[in-house]
Image (cartoon, helix red, strand yellow):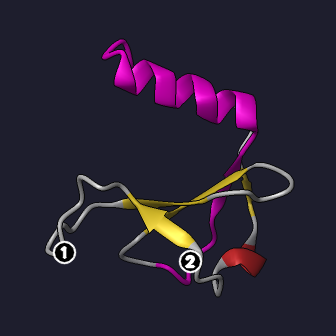
Amino acid sequence: MTEKTDPHLTGTNRWRKSTHSGPEAGACLEVLDNHPTGVPVRDSKTPHAPTLLFPPPHWSSFITAVKDETFRPLP
């Protein structure tokens, strides 16, 4: 997987969290939709930290595996 940081995305306000995240949730990822070069992901606790930028096919595969409950993290 190729990951890149893009510090220019930290001020953007179009980020979204999972609908499963409550207002008190402490460990949430946020995703920025409709980015022209990939899928930016950041930690909601540190929104000004650099983001990870995933190629769209890799992000789609990840989301599919999570939804299908076939995702297995590396040991």
Q: Is residue 34 above or below residue 57?
A: below
Residue 31 is labelled as none
Q: Nearer the viewer, residue 18 or 29?
A: 18
Residue identified by numbered label 1: 23
Depth-wise, is mark 2 or mark 1 nearer the camera?
A: 1
- 55 in magenta: yes
Segment colored magenta: 47-75
7 on left or right of 43: right
Q: Marks 2 and 1, how far apart in space?
A: 21 Å
Number of numbered discs: 2
Q: Nearer the viewer, residue 73 or 37?
A: 37
Q: Residues within 10 Å of mark 2 (few under 14, many from 20)?
A: some
Amino acid at pointer 2: Ala
The residue depicted at 49 percent of the width and 79 percent of the height is 47
Residue placed furthest toward the left: 24
35 on left or right of 10: right
The residue depicted at 72 percent of the width and 28 percent of the height is 57
The residue depicted at 63 percent of the width and 65 percent of the height is 51
* Residue 12, horizontal then vertical, whole percent: 65, 82
Q: Is residue 15 above or below residue 69?
A: below
41 on left or right of 67: right
The quadrant of the image that shows the C terminus is: top left
Amino acid at pointer 1: Pro
Residue identified by numbered label 2: 49
**Residue 13, image quadrant:** bottom right
* Residue 35, horizontal then vertical, whole percent: 77, 59
The residue depicted at 30 percent of the width and 17 percent of the height is 69
Q: Residues within 10 Å of mark 1 (few under 14, many from 20)?
A: few
* Residue 41, horizontal then vertical, whole percent: 57, 57
- 40 in magenta: no
